[in-house]
Amino acid sequence: MALVKWTPFRDLMTIQDQINRLFEESLHRTDEKGLSVASWQPLVDIYEDGQAIVIKAELPEMDEKDIQVNIEDGTLTIKGERKLEQEEKKENYHRVERFYGSFVRSFDLPTTVDQDGINAAYDKGVLKITMPKKEEVKPKKVAIKVK
C-alpha cells in the first residue's frame, strides 16, 4: 500500500468547487426557448425618518396586479412575478440580461411599527411601502406622598 500525503487544502478546494457548481446551476437555468431564467429579488432601499419606516422596491415593467404585499406575524412580505412579454413579431434576441420570474422578499417588522397604518403605493416602477411608527408611550410620573 502506497502512502499518500494528506493535504487539507486540496479537500477544501474540492468542496469549494462543488458549492460553486451548485450555485451556478441553480442561478443560471434556461427555459424551453433557451433563454436564461434566473431567480431574482428586486433591489430595495429602507430608510427611517421621525414618523415612519419606508421601503422602496424597484419593480420595473410590472403591473400592480402582479404584486402582493402581505403582513403576517410581524413580517412584511412582497411577492410578485415579472413576465417576459412575447410579441408576435418573433424578435431575435441576442442577449437577455434582465431577470424574469417570481420573487419573494420578507422583512421582519420592528415592534415600533403601527401595522394598521401601513400603506403601499406603486408609481413609475417603484413600490413604496410606508410604515408609520407607533406613538411612543410617555413615562408617567407618580407623585410620592411623604407621611
Image (cartoon, helix red, strand yellow):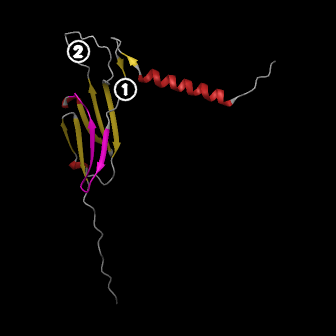
Q: Residue at x 24, y 30 (%)?
A: 60
Q: In which quarter of the image is residue 70?
A: top left
Left or right: residue 73 compared with residue 128: right
Magenta residues?
44-62
Query: Which x, y percent locates residue 31?
Result: 35, 15
Amino acid at the residue labelled 1: Ser
Pointer 2: what residue?
Answer: 86
Pointer 1: what residue?
Answer: 39
**Neighbour tally class for label 2: few under 14, some 14-19, many 20 plus, Cα within 10 Å:** few
Local SS, label 1: loop
Amino acid at the residue labelled 2: Gln
Q: Is the magenta stretch mostly helix, strand or loop?
A: strand
Above or below 104: residue 55: below
Q: Quadrant of residue 77?
A: top left
Q: In which quarter of the image is residue 129?
A: top left
Left or right: residue 72 compared with residue 88: right
Q: Does the magenta stretch include residue 53?
A: yes
As drawn, which residue projects farthest toward the bottom? Answer: 147
Local SS, label 2: loop
